[in-house]
Amino acid sequence: MHEYVNWLRHASPYINAHRDRTFVVMLPGDGVAHPNFGNIVHDLVLLHSLGVRLVLVHGSRPQIEARLAQRGLTPRFHQDLRVTDAATLECVIDAVGQLRIAIEARLSMDMAASPMQGARLRVTGGNFVTARPIGVVEGVDYQHTGEVRRIDRKGINRQLDERSIVLLSSLGYSPTGEIFNLACEDVATRAAIDLEADKLLLFGAERGLLDEQGTLVRELRPQQIPAHLKRLGNSYQAELLDAAAQACRGGIKRSHIVSYAEDGALLNELFTREGGGTLVAQEQFEAVREASIADVGGLLELIRPLEEQGILVRRSREMLEREIEQFSIVEREGLIIACAALYPIPDSDWGELACLAVHPDYRHGQRGDVLMERIEKRARALGLKTLFVLTTRTAHWFQERGFKPSGVERLPAARASLYNFQRNSKVFEKGL
């Protein structure tokens, strides 16, 4: 019970931040067919109930493959794109139509004692996607395979304003009345860009982007993507990452890749600081900056456990308020996860590096080094020549970063007179 209450409290800033925002969600056909699909629907309904404007784009690749196999037709691809002839198009229309009905039925549930009781959702769709043929590439005629030409932004926004969930498929229509088979990733990306969505959410089989060791890559900047695309080759992970990259280039600030196989992956990604998938963001996920008076509460939360352990000297709120301009902080999603302070010593060219602290959950990201560099830069700008630190527990850490053992007798008189012999802190100094 306590864990649930804590989760809800920590989620409340995100609930407020997501209200009235537009999210485009791409769910491939594999995700619709997965046993976890019912849970995904429940999570989407929860987002809708919290005021999120939802556009759901669904794929249908495995369902199309199944229908082709039933009819004894051989799939044709060129450059990883399906060649859609007349017979294949019939299979595509059949698969998309049945999937759409199945999704609408699931979103229409209103059973007692179920997560969807009382939801009363309205799901809408239509000819919101205008398409054009890809044509002939390298001598191969793609026939009824197309690409997105235009998204009906006004029409979709009108439905979202009416609190409807907009459902888009991998079919598009031309002004001449033709039907084209589209890549659902293309539809989702273009919809997000044209709607100026706040987020693009992409479902895949994996938790997100995995590195060479199979470890989740939690955050990415757009400029880091090309190296990963080269490594991933023609995998589906590469398709999702490329869609996120296109969205970023189109102005979408944040795209998320999450797993359709993991129960609650979407909620974990959207309502916790750590998330559970891969975030592709234009802006810095963390910010290093100077502290302000508004940060005092967050600083107290960060340093209080370390003070209780005797690692840091106790500081009252009043003291922090007086000395707040001395602090630099690392902020992550509104949470202060690291801090350090610089105290210039009067009548000397010495400065004290103090109160260097990193939240226990974030101690493996070199944030201490980032703050130390910032403090050293500030010290040089003030004309200081020597930086010193008093520590009881982290002597080796400072020595590894160029600090040398010193003594109280080396400190400027103004600081030496305040030395606490009860704490018996070790003194280290570093020339700037």
Image (tube, rainbow, N blue to C red):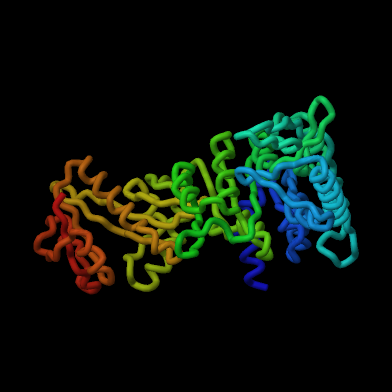
Q: Is residue 420 visible?
A: yes
The residue shown at (62%, 51%) is 14
The residue shown at (42%, 68%) is 305
The residue shown at (16%, 59%) is 429
The residue shown at (63%, 41%) is 198
- Please state, as top left, top right, bottom left or bottom right, where the N terminus lies in the image: bottom right
Report the side of 319 relative to 392 (left or right). Answer: right
Q: Is residue 134 above or below residue 375?
A: above
Q: Residue furthest top?
A: 176
Taking depth in this image into account, of 167 and 397 the one nearest to the observer is 167
Q: Is residue 121 visible?
A: no
On the image, the x and y values in percent for residue 174 come to 79, 29
In terms of image quadrants, where is residue 53? Answer: top right
On the image, the x and y values in percent for residue 117 come to 86, 60
Report the side of 194 relative to 255 (left or right). Answer: right
In terms of image quadrants, where is residue 292? Answer: top left
